[in-house]
Structures are given as structure tokens and as C-alpha cells.
Image: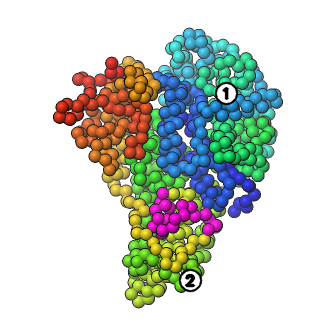
Amino acid sequence: METQKYKRYTITAALPYANGPKHIGHLAGAYIPADLYVRYLRLKRRDVVFVCGSDEHGTAIANQAMKEGTTPRAIIDKYHELIKYCFNKLNISFDIYHRTSEPIHHQTAQDFFTVLNDKGDFIEKESEQYYDEEAGAFLADRYIVGTCPVCANENAYGDQCEKCGTSLSPEELIDPRSTLSGNKPILRPTKHWYLPLDKYEGWLREWILQGHAHDWKANVYGQCKSWIDGGLQPRAVTRDLDWGIKVPVAGADGKVLYVWFDAPIGYISATKQWAIDNGKDWKLYWQDKESKLVHFIGKDNIVFHCIVFPAMLKAHGEFVLPENVPANEFMNLEGDKMSTSRGWSIEMHEYLEDFPDRVDELRYYLTAIAPETSDSEFTWKDYQARVNNELVAILGNLVNRVMILMHKFFDGKVETSADKLTLTDEGVKVEVNKLYNELEQSFESYKFRQAQQVVMDMARLGNRYLTEKEPWKTIKTDPEAAREALHNCLVLIGHIATGLQPFLPNTVTKILNMLNWPAQTIHFDEEVVFTNGHQLNAATLLFEKLEEEVIEKQIQKLINKKQAIEVAVQESEAAAPVTPAKENINFEQFAAMDIRIGTILTAEKVAKTKKLLKLTIDTGIDQRTVVSGIAEHFEPDAIIGQQVSILVNLEPREIKGILSQGMILMAENAEGELTFVSPVAAMPSGAVVR
């Protein structure tokens, strides 16, 4: 187990791109592992700051803005709020969730660049880059399309063909054309600043390949070794683009910091903002040698966090280096790679809409199958089995049985002749102490799947002990033996709740309420005790079984979503281009309304409401969730496939815990009957209502 040689901890989770919703694969890869570790550190009373935020620059943002016919600012505002909302609902306990569009980040990134530039750490060199003469702009990779030299896809991007997956450079495209004007671009010289990674190759070899050969995960170490052994090359830190952080030197008009350079600095600027908000000194967490820096990421970010960002920090000279980067592999879905663009994904907001009361179940399952050493796979059937056979049958069963028996036999009251009630069974006590040691060792070595199973082993221990002692039988012949057995089980449940806090925060709250413990947090150094006369609260179920029809519905929903996107793609390729959506509006901007024809793909009633339906609507631009007050007029199954008029640029708002992204238009007669405002003849989704 790690001795506490650090005074404080700076924990980061990869900044998600604010160019669209994020799926549960992202959650499993970086955010839940980071949250588990941070919650553990807090339970150990460590000084820790947990930072993250939306990555809001780069061509991914600008490209999404083009797709949606809006501005980069509108895109980041829309998706930042959605991503932040999801993290909050999923109990990811960031100390701050920041944004790289904030002024403090722009200043921090520019200051960082200036320090390196003033020290002469950059190389300035000229190269040829595609230029759109009509648009008057240099073209980033994603602003160039052409024919893929591998599969002949005519709409391959300058960095990748999304049809065959081949990584490309703009020069490899056949018949390249600009996405801005449609014209063929020309090559024109442009100057950029480069970070000479080759200059740091020797230092990186020593720092990583010798210094972290035994404490970094094999997948992380292996990827770093491969890159270093292959020879590092200078990497551009600027690019020609309108959207981004301006390069703070003379002669750099029209140039911004490359997103890979500015994004990790977002961890620093987020910490600065947190420090301002909380009266802290941010430098202690980034520049004090007694601070431990840990990055939680997916494997696609290993090079940036283990080679590039450390080289930047080393070049600057004032920052601590990451002590560990416990990157995870990828999580697949039902036998295929997870992909939002192909419709083969479970978006975080989709899960929350369908299972608002099953947040802990998702956290549990994603931890149980976390891709810590190799790619893993989410299946709905396995999710169901884990919930029913582990959470319900092991953990829920123990707590429910003990609480019910305590109320049945002893009116829910703890009565003991001792000053305080702790574990009296020596065998159980030894086993619990052993499990605590295993729990801490697992956390300190970033083995969170193992750590979660250790806590579940405590629950298994409790079930075995309860079955062995049979208090429901001994109550008739030896009431005190029955009381002692149930008392030991109560204390054991307290230990289980302590260990469960990082994993299942909502469940722990339920357990503490049943135990009638007012504390919201039980630190690992606190003793689990009950006092004489302590009164328990009523027993409640911790979990409910997942029925077969619920799972089948999710599987079918996944298939339908993929098929709907495939059809939409085919229709869009065959039809004329859909006019882009306008920016979001408020009611004072009524005249700017953007109304489209949409098609209802799914419909269901919102739980605990009479009037609300949750609709998934294909708008021709995207598929979005809309909450509509029409449940008293229409049966959900009867309106699937119905075409509607939808206001697509109404500002999203949360209704009954669901983020609604638009409003459908209805006509109402004198009797209050509603009918859809829809086209007389079928129209393609996305058609503009004028």
C-alpha cells in the first residue's frame, strides 16, 4: 500500500469535446474511474482537487457547427450544458467542471505559449498547406474532402475516411475540394510554431521507460515505448483557423493554438478558477513537488498525456509531472465498436432518460466490466444479470433481510450491555480487516474492478454469516444469540456502506437512512459503531429487479436507432441538402423561429405525470428528445412514424429530469382536442416550414 508521501492530489479526467453528446463508453473509460479514485482519496481525508471541463476548440467544434448550420459558440454552449448535466446526474463529483472558452483559460494558454516561445523552445518553419482562394482561408484537415485512395469514398475527410476508417493526410485525397466553397484548393506557404519533441526524446526515455516501467499500466507503458522507440518528431502547436485561442505573437494573424496544445492546459486553468472560487492557491496543486498529479483518460489520449503534455510541462519548468496515467482501453457494445455517428451507442443522456432512478446500477456495471487492461463489452443481458444476481440478490438481499428481522424480532432497536456495539464475532472481524486492506491496496493500484468486488465480498460474507447463524430459528431457543447475530450483521452493513461510498453513492444514502445515521460521509478511519438504544428506520428495497421486457426494449431501441440513422443517411444522400438550423432563440426572438418537419421515432409516457410524453424525433439535422404535453390525447405506440412540425432552435430546458430540445406544434379546436401540424403529403425529415 502506498505510504502518504504527498500532501495533496491533483486529479484530472479527460476534457470531453463539446461537439456532441457523450456515450457510456466515455464514462467507463475515464470519468467513473477518476471519480472512484477521488472519492476514495476524500474518504482517506486527503487534500484533493478533481478538475475537468469541456474542450471547446479545434476543427471538431467548427466542423459540427457547419453540420448543424450554426456557429461554434452555439455548439459549445449547447453540448457543454448537456455534458455537464449528465455528469451531475451520474454523480461524477468534480470540484469544478470548467470550459476552455473561458477568458481565464485563453490567458493561461497564451501565457504558457509565451513562456516557451520566449525561452526559444519552439521551432518556426514554413510549409505548404491547402488554401481556399474564394473563402480566403487556409483549410484545416476537416475542411477538405475528396476521394479516399483506399476505398474510393468520395466524401473522405483530410484526416480520415469515415467509411473505411483509414487515417489520411490532405495530400493523399484524390480530387480534394474545400468544404467552405466546394472549390479545389491550392497549396500556399504558411508559417507555424512547432514543439521539438525529438529534443525531449532522451529525457522521456529515461522518465517513462526507466522511471515508470513498473508502476504504469502495461498498455500505457507499451504505447509510450512504441512511440519513443519509433522516434519523436516536431509537432505543430499552431494552425490556421478562425475558431480557437489566438497565437500571442506578432505576425500570427489568423492563427490559433492547436487544440492538442491548449486542451491539457485546461486542467491548469480549471484549477485556477477553482482556487479563485474557494480561496485556494492553485500553484500548490501544480507546482509543489509534494503534489501528486494523476490523469484519467482513454487509450486514444495516452500519447498526449504521457509524452506531449509532459514535454510541455518539462519545457516550461515550473510544473510537476504526472505521477501516473491509468488509461483504460475501449468498451464495445453488443459485439460492435461503440459509435454515436453510426447510432450504435448508449448516450449518457439517453440512459438517464430511460433509467433516471438507476444511476448506481450503471456505475456498478461499468465498474464491473471496466476496460482496465483490455477492451470490454457492454451487453444489456449482462447488465441485467449483474443487477439481478449481484446487486439485488447479494447486496440488496443482505440489507433487506437484516433490517426486516431486526424490526420483526427487536422492533428495530439496538440493545447492548456494552458501551458501544462493534463486531463481536472474531472470525468476521478478521475477515473484514483483511478485506479493508485489500480494498485500499486495490484503490492505490487503480484496480477499481477489484476494489468493487472486495466490497461485494463483504456482502457475501454477511449473507454466509446470516445463513450460518439462522437468527430466525435461534430467536425461539436463544434470543440473545439471535440478537448478537443480527447486531454483527448491522455493523457489517455499516462497513459495507463505508466501502461502497465511492461506487454507489445513492445506495449508500439509502443504507445510512435505514441505519438512521445522520452522517453523509463515513471516513475510512472512523469506527463503525452503534450505541445502546439506537433506533433503526424502516426497511426499504435498495434495488429492483430488471425484467426481461425492459431489456428487450433497450436492445430493440438500439437496433432501431442504428437503422433510423442508416435510413436518414441514405435519404440525405439521395435528397437535396437540408437547410442548416438557425441558432437557439428565446421567446423575445420569436420571429427567428426555425420550424422543420420531423418524424417521431419513439414515444413513451413520462413516469409520474399525466400529460407528458417523451419523444425521439428525427429532425433531418439530428435525432433529439422532446418532452410534449400531449399524453392525454395520444397513445405512444399510435404516433410512432407520425410527421410533425417542430421548433428546432428553442433553447433546451429540463422537464421532469429530461432535457427537452425543441417543441412540436399542435392545433387545438374549441373542444380542446389536439391534432398535429403536419404536411398533407409525406415530406423528408428536415423540410423547412415557411
Q: How many marks?
A: 2
Left/right of residue 262 with respect to residue 513 in the rendered view: right
Badge 2 or badge 1: first in the primary sequence:
1
Residue at x 71%, y 29% (from the top left corner): 110
Image quarter for residue 575?
A: top left
What amino acid is labelled 1 in the image?
Leu
Query: Which residue extends farthest left?
Result: 671
**In front of the other: 565 or 263:** 263
* Residue 90 picture location, percent across and down: 49, 49
Q: How is the image coloured?
A: rainbow
Question: Tag 1's secondary structure?
Answer: strand
Q: Which residue is mark 2?
A: 418
In the rendered image, the quadrant that contains the C terminus is top left
Q: Is residue 430 above or below residue 308?
A: below
Left/right of residue 153 with respect to residue 212 in the rendered view: left
Question: Tag 2's secondary structure?
Answer: loop
Residue at x 61%, y 33% (from the top left corner): 102
Q: Which residue is mark 1?
A: 257
Would residue 89 be seen by someone viewing this image from the given angle? Answer: yes
Q: CA distance from mark 2 to mark 1?
A: 67 Å
Magenta segment: 506-526
Residue at x 26%, y 24% (from the top left corner): 679
Query: Which residue extends farthest right?
Result: 119
Q: Does the magenta portion include 514?
A: yes
Residue at x 76%, y 44% (from the top left corner): 287
